[in-house]
Amino acid sequence: MSERKSGRLAVDIGGTFTDVALDHHGQLVTTKTLTTPARPINGVLNGIRAVIDMAEISPDRIGTIIHGTTLASNALIERKGAKTGFITTEGFRDILEIAYERRYDQYDLMIDKPEMLVRRDHCWTVTERMDADGNVVTLLLEDTVHAVVKEIQTHGIESVAVCLLHSYLNATHERRVRELLQEACPEVSVTLSSDVCPEVREYDRACTTIGNAFIKPLMASYLSELSGAIESEGLDASLFIMTSGGGMTTLKTAIQAPIRMVESGPSGGAILACQVAEQCGAKKVVAFDMGGTTAKLCLIEEYKPHRSRQFEIARAARFIKGSGLPVRIPVIEMIEIGAGGGSIARIDSLGRIAVGPDSASSDPGPVCYAKGGDKPTVTDSDLVLGYLDPDHFAEGRFRLDRDSAQAAVAEQIGAPLGFDATVAAYGISQLVDESMANAARVHAAEWGQEVAGSTLIATGGNGPLHASRIADKTDIDRIIIPRAPGVGSAIGFLSAPVSYEIIRSLYCRLSQFDAKAVSNLFTEMENEARGIVHAGAQGGELSEKRVAFMRYDGQGHELEVCVPEGPVTSETGDILRRNFEAMYLEMFGRLVPGVDIEIINWAFVAATKTTPPEKAEVPKDTRHALPTGIARVYSRPNEKMIDISTFNRADLSTGDRVLGPALVAESQTTTLVDRGFQAVIDTAGNIVMTRTGLGVLQ
Amino acid sequence: MTDTQNSAASEIELQVMWNRLQSVVDEQAQALMHTAFSPIVRESGDISAGVFDVQGRMLAQAVTGTPGHINTMAESVKYFTEYFPPDTMREGDTYLTNDPWLGSGHLNDFVLVQPSFLEGKLVGMVSCTSHLVDLGGLGMGPDGSDVYDEGLLIPPMKLIDAGKMNHTLLTLIKSNSRAPFQNEGDVYALIACCDVASDRLASMMRELKITSLDRVGQYIFDTSRRITEAAIAEVPDGTYTHTMRVDGYDFEIDMVATMTVEERKLSVDFAGSSPCSRYGINVPLNYATAYSVFGLRCIFAPEVPNNAGSLGCFEITAPEEGCILNAPRPAPVAQRHILGQIMPDLMYGCLHQAIPDRISAEGSSCMYDLPLRGGFEMNKGQDATQYAVEITHNGGTGARPGKDGLSVAAFPSGVYGAQVEITESVAPLLFRRRELRADSGGAGFYRGGLGQNIELGSRENQPITWFATVDRVKYPALGRNGGLNGAPGVLRLKHSGVTLNGKGKQEIPAGEVFDFRTPGGGGLGNPKHRPEALVAEDVRLGLVTREAAERDYGVVLTPDGQVDVEATQNLRG
C-alpha cells in the first residue's frame, strides 16, 4: 500500500451513536456522532468529515474504510425486511413451526413461539429428496418448482430462501431450483441454504437461510449506496465490511451473505479487548462492555475470543436463550444481559429489587437526564451514590438532575422497602453488579471454565464504573480500562484482519474415517474462502486453519481439533484421534475408552496476518497522581457518604498511581477505583487496577 | 461485623445472596451439562442441582430441562441426612444413591450430596442429579417384572469419605453397566459439580462476610412461602376430585386426585387411583409429587424459585397400598415418566373446578418417543446397519385462557425434538413426512395446539424394531368449557393399515412406512364462538380444514377463502 494512502478509518453504526475512528500513522482520532435512523449514511458521512477535520488530513489519504453496522440486526428485530418466501422438500413444510418442539420457559404457560419471518402460507414444497449420504432418492420434479413460481408471483414475494433436506451434502437440487426461479422471476432475490449455511440440522439451516433472504435486498441497496456516497465525498478507499466473526470481508461478499454482518458491532469491542489483552500479556480475560441498554460479556483466552457457530436472532424474550431463531454463522461468542446504565429498577412480586431488562434507553433516558424519564435506572443510582459528576456528564453536553434521581429512587425503590435513597441506590447498584457477575460465572461454566483469576477488561460508557465491584464478586484481581473505552468497537475494527470462515457438515465416525471425502470437502472450502480473502487481502500474506469439531459418540460438547497441514490421508484420522485425546485429557482428566469418536462439522478459516500490538508495561517506579477534586460517595463499610479524591484521566500519564477509593473521569466515562484497588497508568495509557495487599505493586 | 449484618444495607445483601445462590446452582448445572454423557442430559437437561442449609432444607435449585427433579431432590437430601446425620459429616465427604424411592424415581438418576464447609465448620450441603446412560439389567424399558430386573440399585453410600474415593463402589458401578466408562465419566462430572457449588458457596460467604446461611435461609423461606400461600389463598376453599382415564399398558388406568384447598394450604391425595401395573410404568410417590407440584407451581406464583419455602406449600399424599401413583418397592418403575408427565393435567382437572378461568385444556403431555433399533436380529451375511436411536417428538399443548395452544411443543417435559437430518445421519432411516397435523388441535374459542404427522421407514429396506412408550392413543386430551378434544395419537403401518400399540416392543416390517401421528391439545371454550376471521385464517394457513371449519366451528368459507357470512350465520345460529 502506498505511503500516501496509509489512513485507516473505521465506522460503527450503533442504535444511538455512530462511532468513527481514524488511524493515521499511529495517530488515533475518534468521534461519536448521532445515528441518523432515517438515512444512516448521513451520520456516517458526518462522522467521517469530523475525524478528517480533526486529523487535518486530506480525504484522499484514506486507503481503507472498515464498516460495521447494526442495520442488519435492526431489520431482523423490527421485521423490516423483504417479503420472504420459503421453499423446502415435500413433506417438510413445517420445519420452521416445528423447530425443536421446545418451550423456552419451563414455568410460563403463556409463552409465544418466536414470530416467524415467513408465514406458513408463504412456505412451499417441491418434490425431491436426498438421503443422508447426499445421494438422490427422488429426482427434482421441475413442474413442482414451476407451481411454486406461480405462488411467488401471486403473493408478491421479493426474496426467497431455499432449504432442501441434506443439501449441505449435495446442492444440485437447490441450484437447479435457483436457476428455474431466476429464469421465471429474475427480480426475486434467491438465497440457497447450501451457500449460506452448508450444515446439518434443517431447522437451523432454514432459519439462517431465511434470515439472509429477509435482509438481502435491503442490505444490498444500503451497501451500494454507501459505497457511492463515500466516493462522492472524494474518498478513494477500499471499503470493507465487518462480520460477526471478528474479521472483515469485501463489499461483494457482504452483499451476498449479509447475515454474516448481524453482530458485527459488538465483535469490534471484542477485537479491541483481544488487542489490549495481548498488549498487557493477559492470557485469561473477561471482556465486559456495559453500555446504555445492555452489557456484553466475552471470554478471551490466549488473546483470542471464544467463538461460536450459533447466534439467536429475533428472540421472543430478549434475554432468554432458546426464545429466538437460530442463525448458524461464525460469531464471537458473547452473552448479552439487560444491564446497562438505562436499565430500570423496580420491586418484583417477591418484594426484592430487580434491575432490567427493561431499559429507559437514551430516550427518554434515566430520570436524571430530565427528558421525561420517570423510572429509576442504574445511572440514577450511580448519580445518587456520588459516582457521576452532574456537571461533567457526556462531555458536559447536559447537566444531570440529581434531585429528581434521588426522589425517584427514594419513592419507587426505597419507600416500599423502608430504605432511604442512598441505601436503595446501593441496592440497585449491588443487584445489577450481581447479575453481571452471575452471568459471567454461569457463562464460563457453560464452557467448562471459571472466571476467578482472570483479568477484567472493561469498556462502554458504564463498564469502567462497575468493573471493580464485578471483580469483587468474581474473584478477579486485575482490571484494565483501555484508552477511549467509549468507542471500543470502532477502534477494534481498525485491527481486524480480512478473513472468511466456512463451516460444513460431513458426518464421520473416526473408526470409519473417509479421507477422500474429507479431502474433497476441504478442497472446496479452501477454494471458496481463499478466493474471498484474496480479493481483499491487497497482496498480504494469509494464515489458514482447518478444524474438525469432534466429540465422543453421545456426548454433547464438541472440541475444536486442529486438522494437520498437508493432504488429508488415512493417517490424518489417527492424528485427529491423538489430538482429540490430548485435548480431552487436558480438559476432563480422563479418556473414555471403547467409545467411538464422531465428527459432524469441519471448518476452514483464511485470514490476513495481523501485527501483534507493542507490549505495554506497568512501570516499576510509580508516583502518586495529584487529585483534581473531591467527590462525595456512599461507602458501605462506613454506611454513609464520605469524601474521596477525583482525577482527570487526561491529566494522568504513564507511572501515575491512584489509590482507591477514587474516581477517574474522562469525556465518555468514569472509572471507579474501589477501596482495596489501586490504579496505575501503563506505558500504553491503559488504566491497570490491581488489588492492594496482594504484593503486585507494593 | 454484627453491626453491618443487621443494617439496612445488609438487608439488601440478603437479596444479593438469594440471587447468588440461584447463580451457584445455575453454574453447577452448566458444569454438569458440559461434561455429561447421556444424550437425554444434552437434549433435555435431565439434571438438577441444588444448595441446602445444614438441616437439609433446599435454598435454591437450578431450573433445568425436566420437572422430574423438583421435590425429588429436596426430599432426597432429607433422606441422606437420616443415613448420614450432619454431626457425622466430614469435610471432603460425598454421598451417592440411585434408589428410585429416595432419588428420582428410576435407577438411571444418580443423586449426589456433599456437605459444604467454611473454615472447618459445616455451613450447608450441595446436591446434584444426572441421568446415567446404563445401569445394567433390562435397562430403561417397561418390561422388568420388578426393580431388580431394571438394574443396579445403590442405597445411600459414601462415594468419597473425607477426601478418599470409594473405588470399590465405583468399580461396581462400572462392572454393572453396558457403558462403564461413560458412567465413570458421569460420576466424576457429578463430583466436580458438587465441588464447584461448595467452592462458590464459601466464596460468597467470605465476600459478604457471613458465617452462617441461617439468616438468608429464613429470608428465602419466609418470602417464598408468603408469596406462594397468597397465590393459593386466591382459590376458593373446597375439595375438588378429578378422575382421568389413560391408556395404560396391561389395563386402562384411572388416575384420581382429590385436592383440598383450605385458606393458604393446598393438599392432594391419590386415593381411588388404579393399582400398580405389572410393567415398569408404575410411579414412586416422590416422582408423582414432582410432576404434580410442577404443574401447580406453574399456576401459583411461578416467579418464586423452587426452595423449601415454596415447595412446602403443597402436600401430596397417596394410599400406602394398591396405588399406581405410590408404587411400593420393589415395583418396576423404569418408565415412570409416562404417567408422571400426565400429572399436571390431573392437577388442572381439579383446579378447573375451582378456578375455571385460569386453567388450560389438556395437552398431549406424554412425550412421543421413537426408540428404534435395527440390524441386531439379522441373519449373518445380510448387509444391514446396526443402530439404536432414541428420538423424541411431541404433540400439541392444550388451549390456554386467552391464547391458542402451542403446536408441537413439549409440556411438561422440556425434551428437545430431534432434527430429521441428524436422525438420518446416525441411523439408516428415511423420513417421508414431518408436518403439522391439520385438525388435530381440539376446536374451541381458543384452539388446541396441533400434533404432527411423521412418516418413516428403513433406508435399507429392513425391518425396524420400535419400543413403544406412548399414551393418549385411546384417550385424547380433553377440551374444557365447551372446547372439543384434541385428536388422539395414531400409530399405524401405512401400507397394511395395521394399527400398533402404544406400549411394548413391536416391528415395522421391511418396506413398510410407519405412520406416527402425535396427539393434539384440547380446545378451550365454545368453538362456535371463535371469531370467524380467526377460523378463516386457520383454514388459509392449513391448520384447520374447510370441512372441520364447518363441522366444528360452524364457519363456512367461500371458494376463495372468505367467510360466507350468511351460511355461517345459519350454522352458528
Image: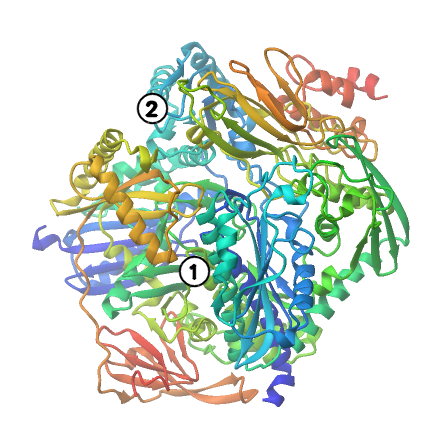
Identify which amino acid the numbered label 2 is placed on.
Answer: Ala
- Disc 1 with disc 2 on a shared chain: yes
User: Residue at 54% of width from left, 84% of height from top?
Assistant: A636
x then y, percent, for residue B507 = 58, 21
Q: Quadrant of the N terminus of chain B?
A: bottom right
User: Residue at 65% of width from left, 14% of height from top?
Assistant: B498
Please determine whether, in this image, residue A611 is positioned above or below residue B570: below
Q: How is the image coloured?
A: rainbow
According to the picture, the residue beneath numbered tag 2 turns out to be A171
Please determine whether, in this image, residue B92 is positioned above or below residue B544: below
Circle 2: element type: loop
Q: Which chain does tag 1 point to? A: A
According to the picture, the residue beneath numbered tag 1 turns out to be A444
Q: How far apart are the two marked residues, 1 and 2, measured between alpha carbons?
A: 38 Å
Query: On the rendered structure, is B379 left or right of A50?
Result: right
x then y, percent, for residue B6 = 65, 85
Q: Nearer the viewer, residue A74 or B183?
A: B183
